[in-house]
Image (tube, helix red, strand yellow):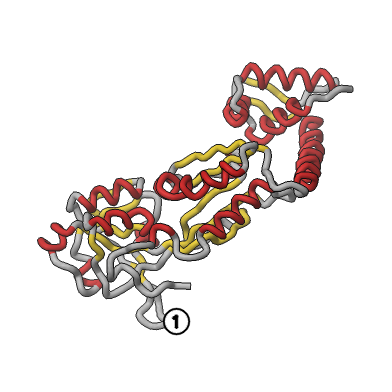
Amino acid sequence: MQYRLEDIETFLQVADTGSITQAADRLCVSKSVISKRIVRLEGMLGIALLHRSTRGVTLTDRGQAFSQRALRIIEDLNLAADEVAEQGHELVGQLRVAAPLSFGSRYLGELLFPFLAHHPRLQFSLDLEDRTVDLVRDGYDLGIRVTRSPALELKARRLALSRRVVCCSPAYRQQHGDPQSFEALLQHPAIGYANVSASQLWQFEPEIPGGEVRALSMRGRIMVNNGESAASAARAGLGVAMLPLFIVADALCKGELVCIAGFANPVPDHIFAVYPQTRYVSRAVRGVIDYLVTALSETPPWERGLPCGVHPEETP
């Protein structure tokens, strides 16, 4: 029997998402194409792979068995292709990456575009948003996370340290002063970031090694769900914000923002490359991660040329 690989891969996407619509979005084809491929595969096999209803699709018992076996075969096929391609240097295939909006638009593209130019046969999709996506459910091969600890269900590789600073506009500091203690800092209105809990966002390193991290419950005035918006609010003089350097480095260099609360260093985050814990990891995923590790191994681009006083002692 002449099975079509695209039909099997389409079925696996439907099985993974539980939705013809989501599978169509992943594969960038219409729902009618998805349905046609599934019907053709079922005709070749002589069995029903899916239960169809107005609420969606589910796998039949035989469909479940076929998906498990077919998934292993597709992984082995991809691995075989990668092993053959190891003899050359060019990457081929598709790669879907999810990353935070600010980091992705400011730095990730700039870092990756030369890499992609060197591998013209690699089809690349970069989705930028600040919410944490489900890599497995949404069909991503790789994610970039700015956090202190990546999800346990994912494999992770550290790319760089992401230091944070407490900042405000020069006019705000002139009017309200530079807090010299935690108690004084608590009196300032905070610009909050909705995607991170307040207890995690406003944490400071201990005064002595081995000491306790100091967490502040700041008095929030403005809450946003995007780092760029938080930086804009700080530039407008609406309060103080604790933000990653990769968001505010330019504003600090231009004098649009200034660092305050120099009596303590915020607990830094880390930038991780994360990917699903599957048996097979493609050359494209490994190649991008290796490239980013090398590109960020020294001083990250956002930390170059910062004004004096911005560099606290780096945390390992």
Q: Is residue 138 left or right of residue 218?
A: right
Q: Is residue 39 left or right of residue 94?
A: right
Image spot of residue 202 (x, y percent)? 34, 63
Which residue is rendered at x = 26% and y = 61% of the image? 167
Identify the residue under disc 1. Answer: 210
Image spot of residue 192 (x, y percent)? 30, 53
Which residue is rendered at x = 47% and y = 45% of the image? 109
Between 71 and 160, the one lying in front of the other is 160
Q: Secondary structure at mark 1?
A: loop
Residue 214 can be seen, yes or no = no
Q: Amino acid at mark 1?
A: Gly
The quarter in which the N terminus is drawn is: top right
Rendered position, 63 above or below 304: above
Q: Is residue 258 left or right of residue 172?
A: right
Which residue is rendered at x = 70% and y = 17% of the image? 36
Q: Is residue 172 left or right of residue 73?
A: left
Between 20 and 54, the one lying in front of the other is 20
Image spot of residue 45 (x, y percent)? 85, 23
Rendered position, 194 above or below 122: below
Residue 234 can be seen, yes or no = yes
Between 90 and 148, the one lying in front of the other is 90
Image spot of residue 264 (x, y percent)? 31, 73
